[in-house]
RNA sequence: GCCCGGGUAGUGUAGAGGCCCAUCAUGGAGCCCUGUCGAGGCUUCGACUCGGGUUCGAAUCCCGACCUGGGCGCCA
């Protein structure tokens, strides 16, 4: 009985059993009288051992001619041997080359020679064969699954909002225009307006994980033109409630990765620490006071009302050293749908920060149509183009709050990666639309 | 958008006007080798992004194009 098994499903105690493995030829080491073929699959490696005097010469001849990274099926017997990498090896009885790989390879999958990110992305299919790269995407999967379960358990309903839209959500950011039959339309920068409309629809609590598109001409290690946003919106709650939800989610994600992705973390050579909740909350005004006291003029010259520059974010990150919230931002620095507090200069808003960068932003929303209309107007936008949105506010819109969390930023900060492109299979930036 | 940097075999690198028909590693081809796990030893193959210019002489200096890395700005 021979069924296909992953390398990770085999252990030394299975000595004597037959196994069929399918995967890629990672390496061949021919020592003369003995040859080793390392087979790699999603779960790891297995050593196929050819003691040349004991093995069928035809089989040996086939094995010697296989190029690296070819796809093969190996049938053989599991043999415990403490000299073998995982404590076992496979003595082959049959090898089939399902598909040979060309040579030379575009990248080295064994880690002997590095490759630049650009080279890696051009041959992403091969880059991902490297265990430390695969590990990132296994963790990404864990984070997504955990998020879905978490939000489900908290009574949130998953929604899907359109990615082709007629108007900008915020007005500020650059959009990608597209041709929609004979009209102009845009790729959606955010599900914001639609998830708010769902509050008016009575769904109460909703979430969406979906791509967002930004046409900004930024070229940094922490920006993408196509990113994945984890968005929630909830009714009859305030912004503190959704902050608690957010910090609980972050802690839950770290816990699930730490406990459920041990092999991936070890492939990446890192260990992660679960952040303690509740996260620190500092007000925007406190942050400005702190920054004004610094020596570096680039930081200290910030004035109340400014957005925080990268240098300012780094200084606050250094000060606090763990996840934190900056709350109560100037109303003018936040989008029109953000609810002002009793002091109209200050809004009921927050950004979730990792010491390295911003991860999420959210707020209490305006639910009164008159206030919302005047805020749109005050931001220099035309309320008429938001009519589809404002309609939902005229017929019973509950108080609500929500946030949007950048999946890629969560991953890159969790895994201490330098470049956000590392956590996206096929990243889209100013210079890259293919593959 | 602004400011700096870089393009050398498939991959990663050395190189600072003649020492370069270009270094090293990895890789491919071939030979030797019975326990490798970045195997080892020997032989061999393979590259200066493109176009102009300066110079007796350019991988090296200058200009342009293209590609690319980083910082800032911008950015739910």
Image (cartoon, rainbow, N blue to C red):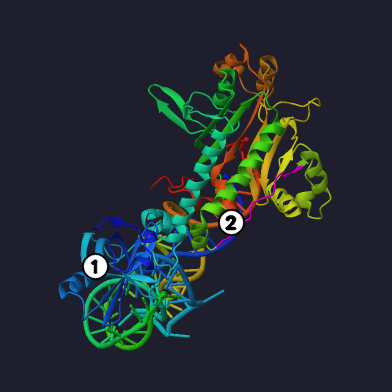
Residue A365, relative to residue A265: is it above or below? above
Residue A27, relative to residue B22: is it above or below? above
- Per the image, label 2 sits on a secondary structure element best described as loop
For label 2, the crowd category at 10 Å Cα-Cα, with few meaning under 14, some 14 to 19 and many 20 or more, is few
Residue under mark 1: which chain is it in?
A
Distance between the alpha carbons at the discs numbered 2 and 1: 37 Å
Q: Sequence order check: which comes first, mark 2 or mark 1?
A: 1
Q: Nearer the viewer, residue A368 or A294?
A: A368
Q: Which residue is mark 1?
A: A66
Residue A159 seen in this snapshot? yes
The reply, left or right, for residue A430 in relation to residue A402 is: left
- Per the image, label 1 sits on a secondary structure element best described as loop
Residue under mark 2: which chain is it in?
A
Q: Which residue is mark 2?
A: A416
Residue A266, relative to residue B19: is it above or below? above
Residue located at (39% from left, 54% from top): A124
The reply, left or right, for residue A287 in relation to residue B59 is: right
Residue A225 seen in this snapshot? no
Q: Main secondary structure of the magenta part?
A: loop
Considering every residue shown, the one lying at the far left of the view is A58
Examine the structure image and report whether residue A158 is included in the region drawn in magenta.
no
Q: Nearer the viewer, residue A290 or A295?
A: A290
Instruction: Indicate the position of residue A19 as horizontal and vertical percent values.
Output: 28, 62
Residue located at (18% from left, 71% from top): A59
Instruction: Indicate the position of residue A427 as horizontal and vertical percent values.
Output: 46, 47
For label 1, the crowd category at 10 Å Cα-Cα, with few meaning under 14, some 14 to 19 and many 20 or more, is many
Examine the structure image and report whether residue A275 is included in the region drawn in magenta.
yes
Q: Nearer the viewer, residue A122 or A162?
A: A162
User: Which contiguous range is marked in magenta?
Assistant: A270-281
The answer to which quarter of the image holds residue A89 is: bottom left
Residue located at (27% from left, 83% from top): A32
The reply, left or right, for residue A29 in relation to residue B6 is: left
């Amino acid at each position: 009985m021979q069924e296909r098994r992953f390398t990770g499903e085999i252990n030394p105690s299975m000595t004597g059993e037959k196994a069929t493995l399918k995967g890629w030829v990672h390496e061949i080491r021919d020592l003369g009288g003995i040859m080793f073929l390392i087979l790699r699959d999603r779960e790891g490696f297995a050593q196929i051992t050819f003691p040349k005097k004991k093995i069928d010469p035809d089989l040996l001849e086939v094995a010697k001619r296989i190029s690296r990274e070819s796809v093969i099926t190996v049938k053989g017997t599991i043999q415990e041997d403490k000299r073998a990498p995982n404590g076992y090896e496979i003595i082959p009885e049959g090898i089939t080359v399902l598909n040979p790989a060309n040579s030379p390879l575009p990248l080295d999958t064994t880690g002997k020679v590095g490759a630049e990110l650009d080279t890696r992305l051009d041959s992403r299919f091969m880059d991902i064969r490297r265990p430390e790269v695969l590990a990132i995407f296994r963790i990404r999967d864990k984070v997504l699954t955990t998020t879905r379960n978490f939000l489900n358990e908290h009574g949130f309903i998953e929604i899907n909002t359109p990615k082709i839209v007629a108007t900008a959500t915020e007005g500020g950011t650059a959009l990608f225009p597209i041709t929609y039959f004979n009209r102009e339309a845009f790729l959606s920068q955010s599900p914001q307006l639609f998830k708010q409309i769902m509050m008016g629809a009575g769904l109460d609590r909703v979430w969406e994980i979906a791509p967002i598109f930004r046409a900004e001409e930024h070229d940094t290690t922490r920006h993408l033109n196509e990113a994945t946003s984890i968005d929630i919106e909830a009714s009859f709650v305030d912004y503190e409630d959704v902050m608690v939800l957010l910090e609980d989610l972050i802690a839950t994600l770290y816990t699930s990765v730490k406990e459920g992705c041990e092999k991936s973390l070890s492939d990446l050579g890192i260990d992660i620490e679960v952040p303690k909740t509740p996260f620190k909350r500092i007000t925007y005004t406190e942050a400005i006071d702190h920054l004004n006291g610094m020596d570096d003029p680039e930081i200290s010259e910030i004035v109340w009302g400014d957005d925080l520059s990268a240098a300012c974010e780094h200084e606050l990150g250094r000060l606090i050293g763990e996840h934190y919230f900056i709350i109560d931002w100037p109303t003018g620095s936040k989008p029109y749908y953000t609810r002002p507090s009793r002091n109209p200069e200050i809004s009921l808003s927050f950004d979730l920060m990792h010491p390295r960068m911003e991860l999420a932003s959210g707020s209490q929303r305006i639910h009164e149509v008159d206030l919302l209309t005047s805020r749109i107007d005050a931001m220099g936008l035309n309320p008429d183009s938001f009519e589809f949105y404002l309609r939902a506010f005229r017929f019973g819109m509950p108080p609500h709050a929500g946030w949007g969390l950048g999946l890629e930023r969560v991953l890159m900060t969790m895994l201490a990666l330098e470049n956000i492109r590392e956590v996206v299979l096929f990243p889209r930036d100013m210079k890259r639309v293919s593959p």
